[in-house]
Amino acid sequence: MKEKVRRLPDKPGVYLMKDRLGRILYVGKAKALKKRVSSYFTPSRAMTVHPKIRALIGLIHDFDTIEVKSEPEALLLEGKLIKQWKPRYNTDFIDDKRFLQVRVDLAEALPRFRLTRFRKEDRARYFGPFAHSGLLRKTLGQMRRQFGILLGDATPQKLSDGRWQLYDDVREELYGFQNILTAEEYRTRVDDACAFLEGKSREWLETLRTEMAEAAAKQNFEHAAELRDIVFALEKTLAKTRKFERDHPVIDADEDAIAELGRALGLTPAPRTMECFDISHISGTYCVASMVHFAEGRPDKNNYRRFQIKSFIGNDDFRAMEEVVGRRYRRLAEEGKPFPDLVVIDGGRGQIGAALKAFYALDLTPPALIGLAKKHETIIFPDEREPLNLPLNSPALQLLQRLRDEAHRFANTYNADLRSKKIRESVLDDFPGLGPVRRAALMERFGDIDRLRRATEEQLAEVEGFGEKLAAELHDFLHRDETPPPVQPQ
């Protein structure tokens, strides 16, 4: 391995540490591969590192590296590979963070909202983890006043008639909620608070993603990597929450939510079909858009659409919104298909203006159109009506939030897919003699870099512009970092 380390370049990249069986133990990124990887094999370092890292070093039998062009690419590729391979030591380091979570035990007669750092498989609901403990505690305090829920310090008393007294002091007057009630009446408050808290979890997740992208853009890669690990932990917990909800179904949207939304927006009839648009980019790069379609208050994934921005390069959410809205409804008009009952734009008045501009440029009559400004969940209208703020526990607002959050998730997924594809294809930049024409021919023939790696020399030679010699050189280049698995003793 020392000889292998000496041959490493002083270039950015990602390294994969393996054990004797070839299993990936750890994935890391490096500004300079040679310097970073060699540090693992410095005897003096083994005595000063964390015990887990010391254990990792003792298990390393081999390693692979992947060169990239820049530190941002290394950061993105590292995250992609960690998600793909789930190496033991990466997972341990993430789980060790032990951020605060909110636990709600629905088996209790009066479920309370408690803080914890450990998640158990106990059928309770968990929200988080949350990196900002101070903000979380403040949010729970606000939720107690807004929803009338109990926190971990509450000691409710059961009365002789079967009802419950939540407090024995003046908090009933402070919070403005009924103090004596049945368990069923209190459970309605819990459901509303859980829906709000889950939305808050996803809101903070998006905030962390934005901070991570900003840190990477400023070349603060260590902070970006820390934020990425927090994002991984939060995504992991939210995924478990969704699994719990599949085991215990809840009503996503019903007639009441749709009817309430119709009344709030002044729409007759109420909106049965809705489409929402979102723009996703990182500092103006990999700019894409998503459109999701809800029917009867539920996702209709067969009618989801995603867009690459074609009319310009750079960072302009308004132009991007105008382009994708125009492309969507020009096509529907040309095909004679109906428009949705309601179009929701993720953003404020500027984004709404861009969407309207697209309709007017095509001489199309727009359907009902609103914007949902994220900061205060404010509904923005395209006309002279004042902005509207629905209660946070309003089923109508929660329906709009689900629609907006799904558009955001779909756009971010597409953005990540494009970045990963670009990173993988960048390996071809280092192969001499591969100009844009031959590169395009390869991608047209094989589709992506993964299929290209699996191609034989004979299949490569069939591509226009390639002969046997060049095909053999490219095949060797694509497999240059591969080493045969170690031979195990009999």
Image (cartoon, helix red, strand yellow):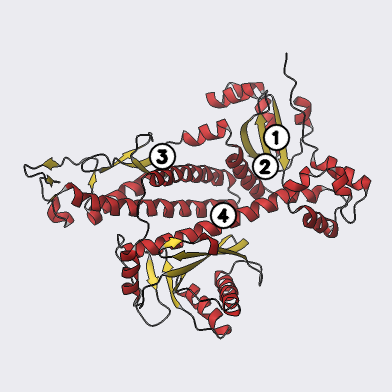
Q: Is residue 293 above or below residue 230?
A: below
Task: Give the secondary structure at mark 3.
Answer: loop
Give whichever of discs 4 and 1 has the lower sequence position: 1
Taking depth in this image into account, of 68 and 147 the one nearest to the observer is: 147
Circles 1 and 2: CB distance less than 8 Å? yes
Q: Position of residue 225 (x, y in %)?
A: 56, 44
Quarter location, residue 17: top right
Which amino acid, by three-letter code, is at mark 1?
A: Lys
Q: Is residue 48 above or below residue 183?
A: above
Which numbered tag is attached to residue 413? 4
**Which residue is under mark 3?**
99
Which amino acid, by three-letter code, is at mark 4?
A: Thr
Residue extending farthest to the left is 160
**Count of numbered circles in the view:** 4
Find the distance from the CA under tag 3 to the CA under tag 1: 32 Å
Label 2 CA crowd tier, 10 Å (few <14, some 14–19, many 20+): some
Find the distance from the CA under tag 4 to the CA under tag 1: 33 Å
Which numbered tag is attached to residue 436? none
Taking depth in this image into account, of 321 and 46 the one nearest to the observer is: 321
**Which residue is under mark 1?**
35
**Residue drawn at (64%, 54%), measured in percent from left and top?**
419
**Which residue is under mark 2?**
31
Task: Give the secondary structure at mark 1.
Answer: helix
